[in-house]
Image (spheres, coloured by chain):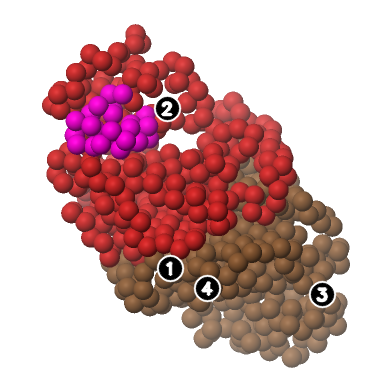
Chain colours: A red, B brown
Amino acid sequence: MPVLTKDALERLTRAIFERAGAPADLADRVAQVLVENNLAGHDSHGVLRIPEYIRSIHDGEIVPAARPVVISETDTTALVTGNWALGQVTGAFAADLAIAKAKQHKVAAVSVVQAAHTGRLAAFTDRAARQGVVMFMAIGTVDRPMTAPYGGAAAVLGTNPIAFSIPNPGGAPVTLDIATSAIAAGKVKVAKARHELLPPDVICDRDGKPSRDPSAFLDGGFLLPFGGHKGYALAVIAELLSGPLAGADAFPGVTKRSGIFIFAVEATVFRPFEEYAKAMAATLDRIKSVPPAPGFEEVLVPGEPEHRARQQRLEAGIRLPADTWGALSDVAGTLGVDMKGFPVLPD
Amino acid sequence: MPVLTKDALERLTRAIFERAGAPADLADRVAQVLVENNLAGHDSHGVLRIPEYIRSIHDGEIVPAARPVVISETDTTALVTGNWALGQVTGAFAADLAIAKAKQHKVAAVSVVQAAHTGRLAAFTDRAARQGVVMFMAIGTVDRPMTAPYGGAAAVLGTNPIAFSIPNPGGAPVTLDIATSAIAAGKVKVAKARHELLPPDVICDRDGKPSRDPSAFLDGGFLLPFGGHKGYALAVIAELLSGPLAGADAFPGVTKRSGIFIFAVEATVFRPFEEYAKAMAATLDRIKSVPPAPGFEEVLVPGEPEHRARQQRLEAGIRLPADTWGALSDVAGTLGVDMKGFPVLPD
């Protein structure tokens, strides 16, 4: 597999989006977020997505030079339009706005309408946690249903991800970032790219029959919610927060409606920083000290696998499946990006 | 099975708590919440709990005459001590405070320390939704671990419930209220009371072996998180929000520490009420119109089963298992409550 350093992959991503019409600062933001997702081990939300985003730009679903704008705001709330800018730009903009409000006024709620695909939410909620702000984020995808409700036989919800990041003064943020479907659509694409079967009970084919073939989902099938009625309930909450509450349907877009809901709380609103830091460390130690179950080496806290992947990939570089690298090279070639500037390391 | 009307069961509950030392208004609040949980179909968090709460009062873990108090507050935040008052009183107090702040200032975050067992969170978050406020609530139980972490072989977390209620102008609130364990401890107790086996993969015995016998958990075993690493991650988030963030460990109690975290957002902060109501109705209709999967009669939205149970039980009365009724009668007898005033209907 081709291996690239963080730096080379960021520069390549930047070059591609600049050639596709993004100003330098926006191309840079997208590159940072996508490569951060690769570093965290979530290749499904990293540079693998570039060909899809470039297609969306060509189709007019993403406007590469657009910038998100605040429609209305108070000290603790804001309604933002993404203006169909690159989703990674919009996600970071909205998160930064919520962080600033929470730092100044302790709590904040921000909704975003006309948001293009943002990818992995933890890329944004982690920004908050690293700055001392607890952040919750939910997205429902109104016009691209792919997940069936609990007890239902057709797709009506998105993968409706939710994320929660909590500042951890003693280490990496504690971060939950989950699709409320049993599997993320991105992971289905990765499985297809790797020619792998899916786990059982995560998708049905277009006829509603269980399948393990990634193509069965991509050819008109649907995803199942994770954890039965509990994951389904979370999916509905994400749909309602990012849709009816956020106001996504009031701002239809070129081809689809899409909303985001964020709430943020400054982490030392209830107690001094030193006490907070000490209590976090004690609680995380307590959880991690549990003896592992058979088949596990140790107990990890949420966000720890991503933190470890990041350390490892910063050192050893980011390995890309041949299919991904081929697709990236094709897109770069089409846009006139010279691939010689982005050295591939020996695997 | 004995059947009682809502009114008779509330009066009986009130009488028991008054005899146990609660002022009339607090006994009334507890009765309302417990019977509301029975009405919603969640017998595990209804009057079944009374003998346990009375024991906690005798043991000094619950102070029946205590009232929650605000320790510190801003326009949008508050730190509350439950003062080890009856948990249902504390939950309602904290929710009402968050509702009032969200109504006035759009967004609010409230943390509670020294909270006794509150029972079903939806009883509080639904109060918010019925008043036009979105509410999120999380509880971790610091000193009574009963759930293993993902990949771990011992209990370290509580059942760590989370709830989310969303106002629905066209009907009952949409409410998620889940234990992040694969099963609530209360449901294990109900299974034991009914002499039923548990579903597979929800508990282990004290030696870490999977079991379906409710007694295996009650005799030193532990619960598993729901949905694998996803449910575990939610459990950790609930633990951190209600513990280190809320400040629960800074206020130790008679025998245990316990915290609550609440976030509230006024539902029309991003758009006018009429638009919100219309978008909610459209989204819920869309979800409910999905054809049922084999084995299901229709697709329900979260909170709908509880709403239906409530309608049914308001009409037909609340049926109590003989064990529950026996335990209630015993407690009432010990406290000198004359059971003649609470008629049992024909089943």
Which chain is indicated by disc 4? B
Q: Nearer the viewer, residue A8 or A43?
A: A8
Left or right of A153, for residue B82: right
x, y percent for residue B86 = 75, 70
Label 4 SS: helix
Residue at x 53%, y 80% (from the top left corner)? B313
- Same chain under badges 2 and 1? The reply is no
Displayed quadrant of residue A216: top left
Does the stretch in magenta take in A37?
A: no
Q: Is residue B50 above or below residue B233?
A: below
- Same chain under badges 4 and 2? The reply is no
Query: Mark 4 against mark 2, which lies toward the viewer?
Result: 4
Displayed quadrant of residue B324: bottom right
Can you see residue A210? no
Q: Are marks 3 and 2 in contact (CB under 8 Å)?
A: no
- Image mark for residue A39: 2
The answer to which of marks 4 and 3 sits earlier in the sequence is 3
Residue under label 3:
B65
Residue under label 4:
B103
Which residues lie in the magenta part?
A11-35
Query: Mark 3 against mark 1, which lies toward the viewer?
Result: 1
Q: CA distance from mark 4 to mark 2?
A: 42 Å
